[in-house]
Amino acid sequence: MPQAQPMTEAMYYILLSLLQPGHGYGMIARIRELSGGRVEMGPGTLYGVLTRMKEEGLIVLASQQERRKTYAITQKGLDALRVEYRRLKHMVQDGAALEEQT
Amino acid sequence: MRRYLIHPGDYAIGENEKCYGDMAAKGWKLRRRGAFLSSFERCEPQQLRYRIELASPALFDDDLTLPEEQRALYEESGWQFVTRCGLVNVFCAPAGSDAPEFYSDPVSQAATLKALRRSYLLSWLPVTLSCLLWLLFAAGMRDDSFSQALTALKAQWTLELARNTAMMLLLCLLVVWGIVSNLYGAIHTMRLCRRLKKGHPLDHAPSGRHLPYRLFAALCWLGMLCMLLLMLWQWKQTQHTALPAQSDDPYLLLQELGFEGEPHYWSGDKGNDVSQIPSLAARVWDTRQSLTCGDDFVWLYQEVFLFSSPQRARDIVPALMVSSTFGQSQEAFTPLSVAGLDGAWQSGLDFVALKGNCVSYLTFSEYEGESQALLLETLSQKWAKVLP
């Protein structure tokens, strides 16, 4: 099983931003761009989630230049992201009836 | 130009951040943070946002610094590292800047409190273990049971309180402050952790919090400062001198018991000396005298306490018995009847004598009953003359 529980919003957007390898500050900017400015991720939140996802094997250190580390998504991370995307998509589809009511 | 301020404890994250921001607005920029004090340097009044990030090392990890990667990430986001002390790392940014808050999700911030909570809870461990080891060691040294070791510890405490009142009260205040501050820190950190886990963001500008605790801490520190000054005064007033040929103080000299001979010194000038200690609870005389009288070697050790009330003198008698060199318990002492004394007790070479506000513990080298009876009779006569 790629993941047992639904992802947090932070995990989802970090994995999404790592479809292209990126470093910490670049990820914050990428997440802002991906979410259309809706998600403003704090550097502390980002660092905590990165550490946890690294331990879980969802991401991997791709390269390091001085203090700046670049991460990339792993196959396990990609699978988990796809599962979450499908779950969210189904949820949105299930909620379509709401739009018909209004 | 520098200024120092006692900052709130590590658990009060928002209070610390607000304190540093307020100081910057008054023209004092944070320079360094210590365990209790923060130092500031003069600057133009400026609006700065201060934020604290706690390091989260593993249980046995000695490295308390923030990982380089995390610090670099904060600096790239617009924060400037200012100082660190223990687990606390302080960053700042201009008030109107784009630097984002460290945590967009309070739940992820809750995880950073783990090491701080652990440090408060584990801070009890060294003191508790030291006390336990000391008791076990004391019990082993005297071949006692644990309860006897506790009784000996209580006796030692009573005597030290009489000998070094200021130092013992300073120690008490330090222990009370240490216990309360660690307990308060642990409880507050756990409450903050619960709030963050429920999704409530950290309050970066709280007002008027922790006032009762800060008042308590201030009183403790004031008390400790007073006791420290009194302790220094006591040490300065304490006199260590060679025993005089005659004395009007309430201790005995071997000459007053009829012994004449050459003073014997154990090492250097030790062996024939008196220490006069002006403690807060009592005046204390501590004497050691050793004489070589022909083929004989005679020695006398005394500790005399002159209290402000007879009750306090009487209260210390059991402690003197328990901590005596040979008797080592109240049960080992036999009461004696000596004219002029309110009480007298003997256990082998150990004696305790009481009259009014004055109590004395003596260890005398002579085994013969006649010499021992002479010791207490002479003491009674001397006290009748010199005691008020």
Image: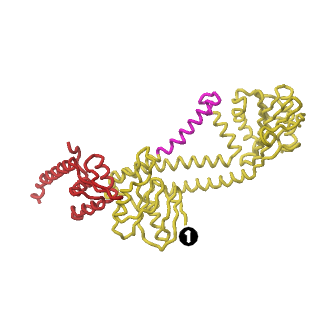
Chain colours: A red, B yellow
Q: Is residue B245 magenta?
A: no
Q: Quadrant of the C terminus of chain B?
A: top right
Q: Quadrant of residue B159?
A: top right
B135 over A30 or under it: above or below: above
What residue is at 72 percent from the left and 41 percent from the top? B312
- Chief secondary structure of the magenta span? helix
What residue is at 65 percent from the left and 55 percent from the top? B226
Chain under callout 1: B
Q: Is residue A20 visible?
A: yes
From the top left corner, tell me how far across and down residue B345 is, in percent. 77, 30
A7 over B40 or under it: above or below: above
Q: Is residue B124 magenta?
A: yes
Give the residue pinned by disc 1. Answer: B1
From the top left corner, tell me how far across and down residue A75 is, in percent. 20, 48
Q: Between B220 and B64, which is closer to the camera in this rendering?
A: B64
Left or right position of B250 against B155: right
Left or right position of B200 against A89: right
Q: Which three-letter amino acid code belongs to the residue tagged 1?
A: Met
Q: Quadrant of residue B386?
A: top right
| Residue range of the region highlighted in magenta in the rendering | B121-150
Q: Quadrant of the N terminus of chain B?
A: bottom right
